[in-house]
């Protein structure tokens, strides 16, 4: 394949490449967003105002608005790249824009033209949005929502308190879940246009990580909304929230991938420059193993994340299951990678100065909360368990071509939010896991193929167990959901290897990443596997080459802004 053909095949990553160049290197003290400035804002628990100005100037907020509404959101694979670019610099930035996207998704999907125009106008003018879903007493139990929207002659009267919501104090619009007739509804509150005492902003909640993020809330007291504020059909609020979470919990993984990239870069550079026992720390086998394992975890997470983001574009009907799997796997793997980097940094991982201006400790604290966003790990396991139990009764043949789902970088039809709309169940097939057997058969590495057959056995055992316990919430039921999610991640790695390594090239074309990544997933499943030290050494070599060449720690050949090195 020619260079121009490869470039056209990877067009989905053009937006990320553009944003990277416009934002500059986060290690550079003169860049628009710097690690040092992020640490300083975090110390003060202050909004990183200059960083938001930088991402707005780079047009990042335009990727929250669909093309049809005047924005630049054409595909979720492209949005993923933009989120990763922001998150390489400061998770507080990507989480702030992510909270706005969460609030906007139901408007794009179910809103009327006037509602969509208004929200697009606000976002493109750099306004924040907030999703008023969470309540202190209800937690993740949406049916326990206490906020009410009482119908009156000319609209609704809103009463209730939303808490632990992103952008609660600074948002110009909110999508609010409330009990109403005939059941729960979702409502668009134009906070920028509401006057009077009907809306009271709540104080910012103090947190361990993401101190620069506006995590707060608001309270409605006899707040009047026009009849036009209702989103979608009456009584479909829970269904709409479930649908919008399929988009947003998928994209959370992009945030943790970006943060893990920077954590790994900090640890690698430290290991290359730190002299221990007369040699660079990178020469020590335990340090090399830690870095290789962190890189492999990041790449396995990325393979899972890329498949989920692309599925939003080409297989939305699968996302009731796949979004929960991605949300369970990706942040968890990335947090593990960051933890391994902390071991490499040792005492310096805890310092608020020195290495990378003390940014690592902030990244570790910020990343630690991402498994909680859009539902905790237990919430995701419950979703996976329930979807698999339902699927037992409806399983059918595979319908989705793998070369389409794993055609990473290939252009897709621009997102049309209202056709199709999200569904509640994932359908009859789960191609990623269903076609694991075929993926294993295509492997030419005997050792990896043998491990792949063990994964197939785990898949079959898990399915059989779920079939017997379909309707029950038990300890074993949640463990089966966990095992399914891990098999899904391994399958994503194998499918990417089979379908896309030739186009992606570089790291993706070296079997070393696959050997280490799949082994680490197998270890999480409790399978007896030995480490592949030769493959680990090759991964460490790739890390050094990618850093020297100003490229992302990724299976995608993404060039970063020129790296600043002291």
Image: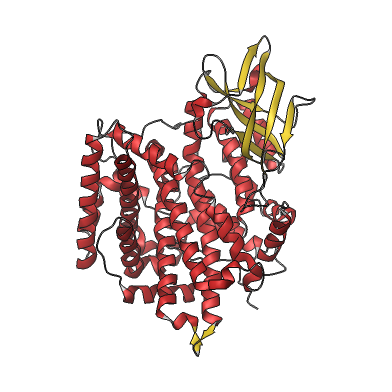
Left or right: 444 in relation to 24: left
Q: Position of residue 120 (x, y in %)?
A: 65, 36
**Vertical placement of residue 145 versus 510, above or below:** above
- Residue 206 visible here: yes
Residue at point 32% right, 55% down?
490
Judging depth in this view, the residue of 481 and 112 nearest the camera is 481
Q: Position of residue 521 (x, y in %)?
A: 33, 58
Residue at the far bottom in the pictured view: 278
Judging depth in this view, the residue of 49 and 358 nearest the camera is 358
- Residue 170 position by quadrant: top right
Judging depth in this view, the residue of 215 and 445 nearest the camera is 215
Look at the image and tell me in which quarter the C terminus lies: bottom right
Residue at the far right in the pictured view: 196
Left or right: 176 in relation to 121: left
Left or right: 491 in relation to 204: left
Q: Position of residue 240 (x, y in %)?
A: 50, 28
Judging depth in this view, the residue of 323 and 407 nearest the camera is 323
Residue at the far top in the pictured view: 153
**Vertical placement of residue 282 versus 473, above or below:** below
Color theme of the render = secondary structure
Look at the image and tell me in which quarter the N terminus lies: bottom left
């Amino acid at each position: 394949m020619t260079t121009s053909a490869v470039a056209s095949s990877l067009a989905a990553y053009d937006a990320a490449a553009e944003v990277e160049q416009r934002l500059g290197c986060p290690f550079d003290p003169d860049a628009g967003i710097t690690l040092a400035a992020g640490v300083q804002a975090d110390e003060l628990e202050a909004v990183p105002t200059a960083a938001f100005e930088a991402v707005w100037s780079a047009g990042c907020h335009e990727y929250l608005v669909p093309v049809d509404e005047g924005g630049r959101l054409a595909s979720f694979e492209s949005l993923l790249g933009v989120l990763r670019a922001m998150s390489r610099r400061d998770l507080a930035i990507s989480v702030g824009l992510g909270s706005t996207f969460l609030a906007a998704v139901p408007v794009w999907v179910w809103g009327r033209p006037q509602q969509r125009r208004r929200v697009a106008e606000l976002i493109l003018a750099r306004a924040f949005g907030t999703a008023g879903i969470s309540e202190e007493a209800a937690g993740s139990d949406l049916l326990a929502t206490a906020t009410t929207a009482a119908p009156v002659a000319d609209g609704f009267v809103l009463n209730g308190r939303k808490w632990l919501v992103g952008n609660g104090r600074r948002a110009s619009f909110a999508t609010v879940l409330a009990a109403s007739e005939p059941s729960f509804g979702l409502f668009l509150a134009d906070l920028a246009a509401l006057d009077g005492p009907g809306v009271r902003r709540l104080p910012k909640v103090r947190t361990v990580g993401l101190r620069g993020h506006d995590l707060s809330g608001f309270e409605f007291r006899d707040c009047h909304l026009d009849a036009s504020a209702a989103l979608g059909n009456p009584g479909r609020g829970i269904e709409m929230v479930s649908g919008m979470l399929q988009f947003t919990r998928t994209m959370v993984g992009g945030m943790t991938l970006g943060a893990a990239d920077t954590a790994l870069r900090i640890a690698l550079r430290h290991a290359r420059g730190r002299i221990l026992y007369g040699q660079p720390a990178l020469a020590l086998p335990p340090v090399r193993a830690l870095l290789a394992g962190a890189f492999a975890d990041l790449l396995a997470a990325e393979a899972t994340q890329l498949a989920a983001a692309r599925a939003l574009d080409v297989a939305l009907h699968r996302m009731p299951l796949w979004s929960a799997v991605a949300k369970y796997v990706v942040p968890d793997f990335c947090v593990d990678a960051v933890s391994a980097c902390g071991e490499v940094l040792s005492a310096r991982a805890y310092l608020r100065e020195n290495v990378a201006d003390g940014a690592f400790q902030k990244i570790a604290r910020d990343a630690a909360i991402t498994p909680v966003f859009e539902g905790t790990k237990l919430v995701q396991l419950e979703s996976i368990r329930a979807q698999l139990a339902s699927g037992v009764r409806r399983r059918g043949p595979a319908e989705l071509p793998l070369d389409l789902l794993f055609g990473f970088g290939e252009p897709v039809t621009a997102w049309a939010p209202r056709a199709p709309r999200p569904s509640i169940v994932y359908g009859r097939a789960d191609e990623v896991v269903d076609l694991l057997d075929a993926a294993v058969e295509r492997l030419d590495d005997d050792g990896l193929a043998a491990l792949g057959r063990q994964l197939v056995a785990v898949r079959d055992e898990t399915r059989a167990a779920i079939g017997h316990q379909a309707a029950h919430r038990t300890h074993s039921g949640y463990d089966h959901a966990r095992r399914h999610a891990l098999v899904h991640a391994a399958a994503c790695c194998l499918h990417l290897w089979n379908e896309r390594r030739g186009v992606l090239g570089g790291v993706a074309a070296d079997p070393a990443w696959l050997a280490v990544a799949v082994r680490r997933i197998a270890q999480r499943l409790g399978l007896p596997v030995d480490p592949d030290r030769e493959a680990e050494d090759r991964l460490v070599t790739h890390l050094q080459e990618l850093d020297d060449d100003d490229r992302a720690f990724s299976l995608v050949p993404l060039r970063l802004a020129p790296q600043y090195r002291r």
